[in-house]
Image (spheres, grey):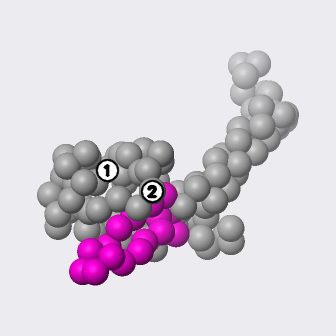
Amino acid sequence: MSRNNEAVVFSALGHPTRRAVLAFLRDRDFVKVADIAAAVGVGGSTLSGQLRTLRDADLVATRRRGTEIQYRVNLTVLDEAMLLLAALGGSLQKRQPTDQETTQEEK
């Protein structure tokens, strides 16, 4: 995942409705928009914007069935984001305080 795409992915993950959509799709394969809307409890126009953001971040994949577009979670991108967060957590635990931070703690 490129640095530019990392920002898009984490921005997309920042909204509770988008996280709810991903949680709903996590164990399902290609779901109709109406089913997602009912499960998440949002209207069609609101959901449309949220799904567009998830598509732009490559967090969902789509397929067309007739006039209908169906969605599923892109686990590859979601897993990459989780690995980036896990690595960040590990690096924060290992970080040593700077001299300035140590001096401030002593005061």
- Residue at image coords 21%, 59%: 34
Q: Main secondary structure of the magenta part?
A: strand
Residue 100 at least partly seen? no
Mark 1: give few (<14), some (14-19) or many (20+) Cα within 10 Å. some
The alpha-carbon separation of the residues under discs 2 and 1 comes to 19 Å
Q: Secondary structure at mark 2?
A: loop
Quarter of the image with the N terminus in it = bottom right
Residue 4 locus on image (x, y percent)? 61, 73
Q: Quadrant of residue 106?
A: top right
Q: Identify the residue position indicated by label 2 in the image.
A: 29
Residue 28 locus on image (x, y percent)? 44, 50
The amino acid type of the residue labelled 2 equals Asp
**Residue ranking furthest to the front:** 66
Residue 74 locus on image (x, y percent)? 54, 61
Q: Secondary structure at mark 1?
A: helix
Q: Identify the residue position indicated by label 1 in the image.
A: 17
- Residue at image coords 17%, 67%: 45
- Quick one: label 2 or label 1, which is nearer the N terminus? 1
Of labels 2 and 1, the one closer to you: 2
The span shown in magenta is 57-73
Q: How many marks?
A: 2
Residue 64 part of the magenta-drawn span: yes
Residue 9 at least partly seen? yes
The amino acid type of the residue labelled 1 equals Thr
Mark 2: give few (<14), some (14-19) or many (20+) Cα within 10 Å. few
Q: Nearer the viewer, residue 84 or 34?
A: 34
